[in-house]
Image (cartoon, grey):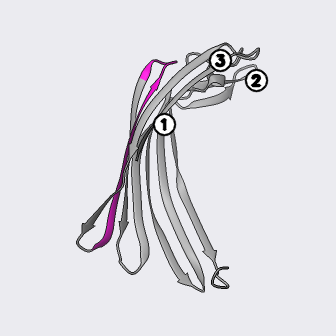
Amino acid sequence: DFGYDLSYNSMISNETEAGKLFHAAVYSAGKIEVSLPFISRFTVYPSVRSDYYSNINKNVLSGKIGVNIKSFEKADFSIKSSIANSFKVPTFNELYWIGLGNKNLLSEKSISFDAGFYYRFNFIADTKIEVSYFNINTDDRIVWTPDARGVWRPLNVGRVKSEGIDAGIRGGVKLFKDF
């Protein structure tokens, strides 16, 4: 798959300074399935994206690669993982809100990693279990923080690490053929 995005945004308001942004992006994502010994299915999901932001006059390249390993032919069990980098420019409000915005904000840059498993089985009900660990390291994170007078303003806080476990279980029973 591939595509592109083009957008032009402008803002004129009594609450903000005038702001303009031309954004262009081109991206591609794919799926590659490989047969390997002792593995039912090995799938790689590569993607890449290039963005241009006129308000910061910057080109940014980001990408992601994910893998999914289905170990057994007869069991619906997969191990999955991905690693990616990402980029977020400040919003119009963060930059241009009169008295609150911050024109000196830097863009956020992140590296993320996740790994987990998916298991589906049918015992009384069609049941799906998914568990993933995630870790995101962000530089120049934008956070709205109160100043000494209690007025909230956006600022870059340096490095932020977010990590956790995402777990879910879903089940369903089919009562009749189409219900």
Tell me where the magenta segment starts and ends, as one range: 39-58
Percent across and percent down for residue 37 are 23, 72
Q: Based on the picture, tell me whether residue 42 belongs to the magenta stretch.
A: yes
Q: Which of marks 1 and 2 is nearer the N terminus?
A: 1
Q: Is mark 1 on a helix, strand or loop?
A: strand
Q: Which of marks 2 and 3 is nearer the N terminus?
A: 3
Q: Residue 138 carries which label?
A: 1
What's under tag 3, amino acid-wise?
Answer: Tyr
What residue is pinned by disc 3?
96
The residue most toward the left is: 37
The mark lying in front, picked from 1 and 3, is 3
Q: Which mark is residue 150?
A: 2
Q: How far apart are marks 1 and 3 (CA)?
A: 23 Å
Percent across and percent down for residue 105 are 55, 21
Percent across and percent down for residue 117 are 45, 66
Q: Is the magenta stretch mostly helix, strand or loop?
A: strand
State the residue in front, 57 or 145: 57
What's under tag 2, amino acid-wise?
Answer: Gly
Packing grade of label 3 (10 A; few <14, some 14-19, many >=20) is some
What's under tag 1, amino acid-wise?
Answer: Thr
State the residue in front, 149 or 154: 154
Packing grade of label 2 (10 A; few <14, some 14-19, many >=20) is few
Residue sitting at x 60%, y 23%: 9
Q: Which of marks 1 and 3 is nearer the N terminus?
A: 3
Q: Residue 62 carries which label?
A: none
The mark lying in front, picked from 2 and 3, is 3
